[in-house]
Amino acid sequence: MARKKIEVKAPKPVTVGRVHARPRRGPRAAGEWYWQARVHEDGTSRTVWTGWATAEGIVREIAGLVARDGLDAPAPKPAAVVTVRDLLETWTAAQQARADIRPNTLLNYELAARHLATVLGDVRLDRLDLPAVERFRDQRLRGGASTGTVALQVGVLTMAWTWGRQLGACPARDLPRLSMKFQPSPKRNRNTPTPEDIARVLAELDGWPRLAFRLLASTGARMGEVAALRWRDVDFDNGEVHFRGKTGDRTFPLLPDVIEELRLWGPGAPADGLFGVKAVTVYGQMRSRYLGRACERAGVRPFSPHALRRAAVDTFAGEGVDIGTAASLLGHSPKVMLEHYRVASAKDRRKAVALARLGCVPEGKVLEFKRGG
């Protein structure tokens, strides 16, 4: 006899001040539901919190949100939001004020907003149509951006547009949907530099680009993780740097000469960026300007900042570092590291055969050669 499914009744919506929370799905085994909390005002609404909580816990979450963020007072509407640039600047400022966004994510938002504003900044919101968005797509692709990058940046525009609609700043219509299916992606530069290449390029850099390159090469970190570093993330006493990456927080030990270079460069105030320029500048210009020119001056085949991450994987593997340790240092899972980053070279294969000595006679043992006949 089939067991009867037991229906669990969802908890009632919760209201604290002007914040209304409603369960959207669940429950989990612990009795938690996934809640969405919104603020309604002047005929529009905006989401201020989402997450898992029990019926009792959601009251504490929302009460804390109201007390911390002052949600009893009406939220101000963006003033004079007329063009795409106005919208992006206002939306970006709102994202910067959020406490639940990782630095790397915020960096991607800011960089996307810069590219969008360069092409679409002067377009009035009421005149933003499909041909305008297609112009942005085509110009970015001609400039060498990948299809995936352009799709993500158009996604940022969509998020800003949706946010603007909730506040009454954008027309009450959806942003035109853009097709990316038939747009060719430029071939990715998959060149992984050798240690000699890295040393030659480093010698061609100075200022903050040198420091950023040094940290990329010595940690194998993602470009966004390095660009977002602040002085509070550097532990001079223990010789470590703390990354806040997309796979979670991790600590990376630094070599003494890297720590010394950081000492010579700073330190600054704990909340200040490491490089003395905006994180979005480091993220955007390291590849497009400084690294390419340094490769050209050094006579090295061009490579991307991300190639230093692959180089770190190769170096760890070549030195016999176990996969689990290497993955934890780089913020990978072992599976991703092996599938997408580790590329065995001809030198690696020769070394493996020499070490394994496949088919060789064990040392000290003599085999008699028998002639057939």
Image (cartoon, rainbow, N blue to C red):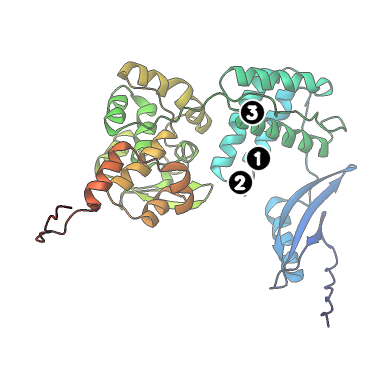
3 or 1: mark nearer the eye: 3
Q: Secondary structure at mark 1?
A: helix
Going from the N terminus, do you reach mark 2 or mark 3 first? 2
**3D distance between C-alphas at marks 3 and 1:** 20 Å
Question: In the rendered view of the protein, which quadrant contains the N terminus?
Answer: bottom right
For the question of whether residue 243 can be seen, the reply is no
Amino acid beneath label 3: Val
Q: Secondary structure at mark 3?
A: helix
| Disc 1: which residue | 95
Q: Position of residue 94 (x, y in %)?
A: 68, 39
Q: How many residues crowd around disc 3 within 10 Å: few (fewer than 14), some, or many (20 or more)?
A: many
Q: Secondary structure at mark 2?
A: loop
Q: Position of residue 152 (x, y in %)?
A: 65, 34
Q: Are marks 1 and 2 in contact (CB under 8 Å)?
A: yes
- Please identify the residue farthest to the bottom as the structure is shown: 1
Amino acid beneath label 2: Ile
In front of the other: 177 or 24 = 177
| Disc 3: which residue | 150
Residue under the image location 44 percent in, 29 percent down: 304
Residue under the image location 12 percent in, 55 percent down: 369
Q: Position of residue 355 (x, y in %)?
A: 22, 50
Q: Position of residue 5 (x, y in %)?
A: 83, 75
Quadrant in the picture for residue 78: top right
In front of the other: 67 or 246 = 246
Q: Is residue 4 left or right of residue 144?
A: right
Give above or below for 8 relative to 37. Answer: below
| Disc 2: which residue | 101
